[in-house]
Each structure stands twice: as structure tokens, then as C-alpha cells.
Amino acid sequence: MSNNTVIKQRSAESDTATPVIAVRGVTLRFGGLVCLSDVELTLNRGEILAVIGPNGAGKTSLFNSLTGVYVPQEGSITLNSANGSTHALLGQKTHVVNKLGLARTFQNIRLFGALTALENVKIAAETRQRTGPVSIMLGLPNARRAERASDRRAHNLMEFVGLGDKINELASSLSYGDQRRLEIARALATDPQVLLLDEPAAGTNPTEKLELAELIRHINAELGISVLLIEHDMRLVMSVAHRVTVLNFGKVIASGTTAEVQRDPAVVEAYLGAEMAAEMLDAQAQEEE
Amino acid sequence: MSSVTTKTREPEASFSATSLAKLRHKPWYKSDAFRRLVMCVLLGVLFTIMTGEQAGDDVFYSLNDSLTNWPWLGTWVAVAVGIWALITFHSYLLGNPALSPVHKVIKDATAEVKKVTPVLGRREVKWPLIIALVVVLALLPTWVSGFWNQVMVNEIAVYVLLAIGLNVVVGWAGLLDLGFIAFFAIGAYSAAYWTGKLPVSPPVELTPFLVIPVAVLTCLVAGVLLGAPTLRLRGDYLAIVTLGFHEIIYLLATNADEFTNGPAGVQGVPHPTLDLGFWSYEWTTTDLEQYWWMIMVIAGILIFLFLRLEHSKVGRAWTAIREDEVAAAANGVNTVKYKLMAFAIGASTSGIAGVVMASKVQFVSPASFELMFSVLVLAYVIFGGMGSIWGVMLGTAFLAWLPQILKDYVDEQDRHMYLGAILVIMMIFRPQGLIPSRRRKRELNLAKEGLGDADAMTEPVGGRVS
């Protein structure tokens, strides 16, 4: 309990910007299994927030709760749009959440493998268009215009993520790193306010990781999209994230800047176990002396 | 002490080259080739029984008779072994490796995308071909006998219309629909109702051509009404629901005497008439060519519209839903809306076919809408190649034509056995169908390597989307 109060103080301190996503007291249960318990999380506009934690801590469940795949039993999730409107995301359908401005990628890549890379991005871009089946069947000018527009947008986004030369490749034939980028391009095509990246660096090599970090910073700085990032690669987290929230056993155990979190005893304990943590903290204390 | 333990351990712990080879070795009777041989011989025997003499109800007599007919049995087994040899040794004959690793499958699929437009896709080849095809189709009824004209209109053309519609539902959206004929029935009964032939009279009487838009609307509404509560179900569950819907419509047609005239059906649905002011035409029972041309025009219009749909955002959204519903929804695709759309478009096509059928045969009765027909249309679509309009049409035409042509060569009762056998063989050796759609083929290849779903039959990983 004392941990929680610490967190609240800290987030209050860093809450200088406006929150774009506010997760309050979210609890998700599957039968007797508590997946998320009273999770509090704030993503400020224009910030990159990393969510870290050991395996099974509930990070992906949190993402699934945010995007409407799971419906938590308690709590609230609110989205403050750039245009000033506020939406409750809890219990919304997945595609509605996406329309409101939350786009995501998946931990286990979920591209449409039998379609080309460009078509993958186009599908997402086209969900923002209003052309109906009748105007498409009749080949009306607005349908043709929409087709050209989505084509252009998809091309631009492929260039943006650095896949400009792989437009006509089959999605499933791309390398692992390229597939991750394509997923990001597809998510960006829906013109989101918030991008949720679920372990984007998993399975990529060190060069690709550097490029990925660069890409995430670009997305954040140039497109002005707030990023919520789940990642195990600490070097990546420390290099891109403005703030970090740590989950363990479905609970938020720490939240703050990267430096603060690194020093937090609860975090060290969660990752290394109590004994190791005690030793490490002793060593740190001795060094400081 | 220590030396003893090492001595006893050694033979267990280390594997010699010979013991490893033994582990790897597969006995001959477990090899794939042998298993295939056994299956082929069994199939040969089965075909012998199938094609053998029939002696009324005495199964044992006919079994004995067919299985001791040595030349006949020998022929079938020889054919079976020949096919086995072809399958087993074709790689030696043609020189390509039989097994392909995962990356080869993907490379092949990629190569296909990158490939320059195939010969058939080139403008200067495509258009002459299409024109030639249209001319041949247009002249076809004048070349064949009255019987075949009848078959062309009643069996082939109507089923082609149905298959084009079902292809949207099954092939493009990946929804398994076993109740497709229910919409056919709705279309046919709409025709009977709006032309005033049902026991209940309509507010205004229409001609069959004017009934078509009404029937399309009715089927759209029926499709949405059925789809809205059920389309969140997947695969087999949806199939059962559509099956139930079919039974409801069928039993309604049979039992609601005061509306549908029950099992006796209704007669006298008028032939279509066309009055354009300067030119008018009335179809009659004897002018089968006219019906053929009418249905070809309708099918042509539908193909034109549907092909546009397939290569648009709607077609891509359907593919996305088919491949990964969770990912599609997460990227903003309203999955229920697109499924409903496919369902309604398929239903209305079925409705058009129903109107055409009703006014062609001038008779509507529940017997024309038995479950068997739903299954048949589905089989045609899968046989032709789900998702490819041309494949579906070719498959339907072939399978509707086959029982009729077999009439002249085999026992009347055996015809559908051959149909069944062809379906089984086709699904084993060419599951993608006669002319597979390119997307579908890639999906099947990827699914074979465990890299994805080929259809919407399986539960999504990581939760259900509602």
C-alpha cells in the first residue's frame, strides 16, 4: 500500500502536461486469476511512456484492456482527444477505440500475411474513409479519389518507416524487423493520437533496434503522437522513454523517470528477486559512501 | 568403484553412429509412399464396387459379383497404382523437389506478386479473350439440343448466379454459410407474392423484372436480420446458425399454408416482360435461349460490380477479417459491418436468382429449397476455387453439367457417387479449387506452414472480438 502512495506522489509531481490517456483503478480478472489489479497509469500528450515488467506482469493485458479486446471489471480508462473531447474507452469495441485515436501493434506480429505490404497499410488507411460499397461498385468519382488517397497515404507511410523499397513484397516474406516496421506503418495509417507498441524490438538485431529507437523518436517528435511502449530491452527503453511505469503481478510497483525507476528498490526486487536486490542495494550504498 | 560405474554408464550415455541411424530409420511399411500405395489400391477396390453390378437390395450378391469380376477389378487397381506411381515418381520425371521448406513457400508466393503481369492479364490478350468468351457464351444455346438448353438454363445458369453470390460470403468474407438457399427461397416467394400468385395478395402487382429490386431489398433486410445477431459467431457456429435459418425458411414455406400454399406450391408466376416503350419483349417457356441470354446479362452485371468490390477497400477489409479478425479490428475495420455487408450482398444475389428461377419455371414450391441445394452450391464454390469468380463459375458449370452427361454413360443411381468421388479427390489433391484466387492460394500455402489462418474457422489467438 505504501508503494501506491509513493507512486501517486510521483505522478503528481510529473503531471505538468495534459494527460491523453488516464487509466484509473483498472482491475481485470479471468475467473480467480487477477491479471491487473488497481492499475493507475497516465500518458501525457506528446510523451513516450514505457511500461516494463517481468514476464506475466500484465503488460499485454493492459494493452488489450486499453484497446477493447478485454473488458476489465473495475476502473476507468479515459481518452482526452486533441480536440478537447473526452471519451471513456472501457468496454468500447476494438474498432471504435481505434477510431477514437488509439492504434496498436502486436507482440506476436499480426500482419495480413497473404497481402502485400502496401495493401496491409491501405486497409488501415481506408478505415478512415467514408466511401460505401455502392459508390465503389458504380465506380463513382469519390470512390476513385478515395482509392488514390489511400494509395498515396500508404506509400508515404511506407517511406516514413523506411520500407519504401518493399511496397509490393508479401507481408509474410519480409524480415522480422521489417514486419515490425510494417505493423507500425499500418498502425500509423489510422492517424492515431496514441500509438501502443507491444514489444516492437522483440526478435530484432542490434542495428534494427537502433533504427527502431530512431523511428519511435521520429513518430513522437515529427508526428506528435504520444507513444505507450512495452519493451523488455532496457537499453531501448532508457534511450527513448521519457517516463517508465513498472508492472509486477498486475500491479503498478513504480512510476517515474527512467533514472528514478532504475533506483527503485521494488523494481530491482521484481527483476532480480529479494536476495539479489538486497545485495545490489548494499553494493550501491557502499559505492555511494 | 569409479571404473565400474563408468563402464555401466557408457553404453547408455553415448549413441554410436549406427544406433542413431537406427533411430532415424523408418520401416518401409511406415513410409509415405507405401501408405499412399495402400490408399490408392483401396480406392481402386472402392471404385470397382461403385461401378460394379447392382443386384437390387442384395448387397452381398453385388459385392461378390463386382469383386470377382477380375478384369474390371484389375483395371481399377491398375489405374490406382498408375496414379500412385505418377504421384510418387513425378519428381524424378519432372526434376523438381517434392518437399519445400518454409522459406521456399514464402519465396514462391512473393515471386508471384513481383512477377510481371501474366500473359492473360495483359490488355491486348485479356480483352479479345473476354470478347471471344462472350461470343461463345452467347452463341452456345443455338448450337446445342433442347435438352442441353434446358440444362444450361435450369441447372447451370441459375447455379452460376447462386455461386457468384455465395462466393462473396464464403470466398471473400470467409463466412461459412450453409443456409444460402433460404435467400433463394425468399427471392422466389417474393416473385410469387408480388405477381399476385400467393394466397395473400400484394398491395400492387409487379412484373418479374420489377420484382427483382424488391426481392433484392427483401433479401438485404433478411440477410441483415439474420446476420446482425449471429455474425459475431465464427466458423462452425455460424454454419449451424445459417443451417437453422434455412430450416426456418423451409419449414415456413412448407407449413404456412395460408401464405405460401404449403407443400403444393404456387403456380403461374408470370414470365418476365420487358417494355422499353420503343421495344418490348415477352419471355416464354419455349425460348430457352432468351432465358440464357437474360441470365448471362444479369451475371455479367453482377460480375462487373463484384470484381470492382473485390479490388477495393471492401475486398481488402474482407481479406483482413478472413486472415486475422483481431488485427483487422485493432486497425479500425468494423468487422461486423463488413461481414454483414458480405452477407447481405450474397443474400440479394441469391434473391435475384430466386426471382429468375420462379419466373422461368412458373412454379414455386418448398421442394426446390431443400438443404441439399445449399450444400451443393457450397460444394460448387469450393470446387471451383473460393474467392475467384472465374473459378467459381467454371466449377459450378462443370459440376452442374457432370451429372447430366453421366446420365448417358453410367447407372442413373450412381451419378452422384461420381460427383462425390470427384469432390473427395479434388479436395485431397487440389484444395484451392480449379482456378484458385491468388490471395486464397497464398493463404493456403502459409497455413500449410503454420504461418496463418486460411479461413475464419479457427478461434482468434488472444481473445474473441465482439
Image (cartoon, coloured by chain):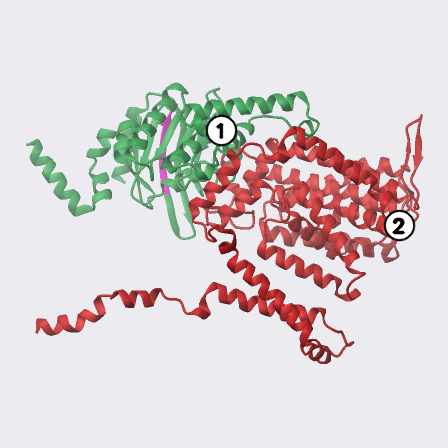
Chain colours: A green, B red
Q: Amino acid at mark 2?
A: Gly
Where residue B425 appears, as percent x and y from the top left, is 62, 58
Judged left or right of residue A129, residue B273 is right
For the stretch drawn in magenta, the main secondary structure is: strand
Task: Please give the residue where the numbered disc 1 appears in the rendered image.
Answer: A87
Output the chain of dot 1.
Answer: A
Q: Residue at x 41, y 26 (%)?
A: A161
Q: Nearer the viewer, residue B433 or A47?
A: B433
Q: Which of the 4 quarters of the picture holds residue B142?
A: top right
Residue bounds of the magenta highlight:
A37-45
Label 2 secondary element: helix
Which residue is at the front of the view, A65 or B100?
B100
Query: Mark 1: few, some, or many residues within 10 Å (few <14, many ≥20)?
Result: some
Would you say residue B192 is visible in this rendering?
A: no
Q: Residue at point 17% right, 43% down? A: A277
Q: Is residue B302 left or right of residue A270?
A: right
* Residue B410 in sight: yes
Image quadrant occupied by the C terminus of chain B:
top right
Tell me if residue A194 is in the magenta stretch.
no
Q: Which mark is residue B146?
A: 2
Callouts 1 and 2 close, C-beta under 8 Å? no
* Cα separation between marks 1 and 2: 67 Å
Kindly identify the residue that appears in the image at 77 percent across and 77 percent down: B55
Placement of the N terminus of chain B among the 4 image quadrants: bottom left
User: Looking at the rendering, which quadrant does residue B289 occupy?
Assistant: top right
Residue placed most toward the observer, A47 or B133: B133
Above or below, A143 against A272 in this view is above
- Specify the subunit that label 2 lies on: B
Q: What amino acid type should be assigned to the residue bearing mark 1?
A: His
Left or right: B307 in relation to B93: right
Name the residue nearer the viewer: A173 or A226.
Answer: A173
